[in-house]
Image (cartoon, rainbow, N blue to C red):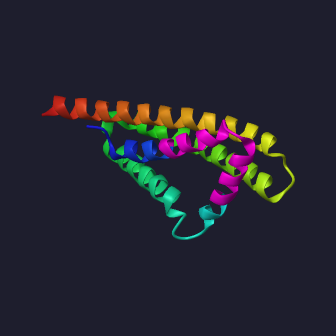
């Protein structure tokens, strides 16, 4: 059975897929979308749209890490990939949107940065899902052998 962390990471991947529609579309439409979306990252209850899957995934990955036994190296890999890869990409995305919305950075330049950061984040989320799946299957296989 797949760990719950996959559901949270999958939700984040889904949000990223919605962003991709704007990343590869008209830069002015993307500017409108991202400039409308940016303030929701700091205002309640809108912040819950991102916070719930992030916190849910994080708690589940840590729980998997603690309880997994032989699969723990894969769950540790998920933590490393998300923290060292995902967090800087998210910060880079926020910075690009902030500059696009509140300075004179051209939407085309910001979109180039966003496309790159979102592409890397998509790879990170897919790798995280794979790591969590392998870690869960290792834990399940080991518990089946001990029974």
Q: Residue furthest right?
A: 104
In the displayed structure, does residue 4 sit left or right of residue 16?
left
Q: Report the residue at 46% width, 39% height from top.
A: 76
In the picture shown, does residue 40 fall above or below 71? below
Q: Report the residue at 32% width, 36% height from top.
A: 136
Q: Report the residue at 41% width, 49% height from top.
A: 62
Rendered-image quadrant of the C terminus:
top left
Residue 31: image location, x then y, percent:
72, 50
In the displayed structure, does residue 108 sit left or right of residue 3?
right
Q: Nearer the viewer, residue 25 or 56?
A: 25
The image quarter containing residue 85 is top right
Magenta span includes 95: no
In the displayed structure, does residue 20 sit left or right of residue 7?
right
Q: Report the residue at 45% width, 44% height from top.
A: 9
Rendered-image quadrant of the N terminus:
top left
Q: Nearer the viewer, residue 119 or 70?
A: 119
Residue 131: image location, x then y, percent:
43, 33
**Magenta residues, start to end:** 13-37
Magenta span includes 19: yes
Q: Is residue 82 visible?
A: no
Q: Nearer the viewer, residue 10 or 134?
A: 10
Q: Residue furthest left?
A: 147
* Magenta segment main secondary structure: helix
Q: Nearer the viewer, residue 47 or 142?
A: 47
């Amino acid at each position: 059975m797949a760990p719950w962390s996959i559901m949270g990471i999958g939700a984040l991947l889904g949000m990223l897929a919605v962003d991709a529609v704007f990343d590869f579309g008209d830069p002015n439409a993307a500017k409108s979308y991202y400039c409308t979306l940016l303030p929701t990252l700091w205002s309640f209850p809108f912040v819950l749209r991102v916070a719930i899957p992030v916190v849910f995934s994080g708690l589940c990955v840590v729980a998997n890490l603690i309880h997994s036994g032989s699969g723990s190296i894969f769950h540790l890999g998920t933590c490393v990939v998300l923290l060292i890869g995902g967090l800087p990409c998210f910060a880079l995305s926020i910075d690009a949107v902030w500059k696009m919305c509140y300075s004179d950075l051209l939407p085309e330049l910001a979109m180039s940065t966003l496309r790159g950061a979102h592409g890397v984040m998509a790879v990170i989320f897919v790798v995280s899902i794979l790591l969590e799946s392998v870690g869960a299957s290792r834990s399940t296989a080991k518990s089946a052998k001990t029974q």
